[in-house]
Amino acid sequence: MPGFDESYLGWLRKLVGNQRLITPATRAVIRDGKGRVLLVRRSDNGQWVMPAGSMELGESVMDCLRREVKEESGLDVLDAQVMAIYSESRFAFTNAYGGEHQMFVVVFLVEQWAGKLITQTDETTDARFFALNELPNLPPVYRETLDDLQRYTGSVIVK
């Protein structure tokens, strides 16, 4: 796994500094057979989130999804469906290094996966499945994603 400086986003940051970028990314809502949702605890800020990350050059959104889930949980995505697309300007944020991002996130519902859950990776310090009524504190966008999961009927939610 290349470091941030070798990533597509790292390369762009070298060119444009902290100027706002539109950042294509994926997020995985991974459920187990009991309806619980996988969350990972980020190693950089300690927050519980869903596996997610930015696309690299040459990747499709499905490639990005599979790579990010593997990197952050050890699981292999076997099948996924698009649940939502988030691109509104309210999803903009400034990262810990001052880089501004307006996200373009494709949220996938993943109910078919394989492998053994890894609880610690280069990017995470913990990973586990949570019942929806027993969630840890989540950043608002992840809470919103779970709210959207509750109202998802098979039609893509676009925001």
Image: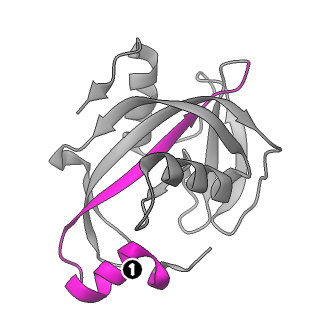
What is the x, y in percent for residue 149? Answer: 45, 22
Q: Residue at x 39, y 24 (%)?
A: 148
Q: Look at the image and say whether residue 12 sits in the magenta stretch.
A: yes
Q: Residue at x 52, y 52 (%)?
A: 63
Say which element carries label 1: helix
Residue at image coords 25%, 48%: 91
Q: Can residue 19 be seen from the camera position used here?
A: yes
As for residue 141 lying within the magenta part, the answer is no
Question: Which amino acid type is marked by label 1?
Answer: Gly
Quadrant assignment, res 154: top left
The C terminus: image quadrant: top left
Q: Residue, x 34% and y 46% (percent of image)? A: 105
Question: Left of 139 or right of it: where is 2?
Answer: right
* Left or right: 58, with 39 as reference point: left
**Left or right: 29 with respect to 84?**
right
For residue 19, what is the image quadrant? Answer: bottom left
Image position, residue 15 (x, y; %):
24, 87
Q: Which residues are magenta?
A: 5-33
| Residue pointed to by mark 1 | 10
Instruction: Work out whether residue 138 can be spotted.
Output: no
Image quadrant holding the N terminus, namely bottom right
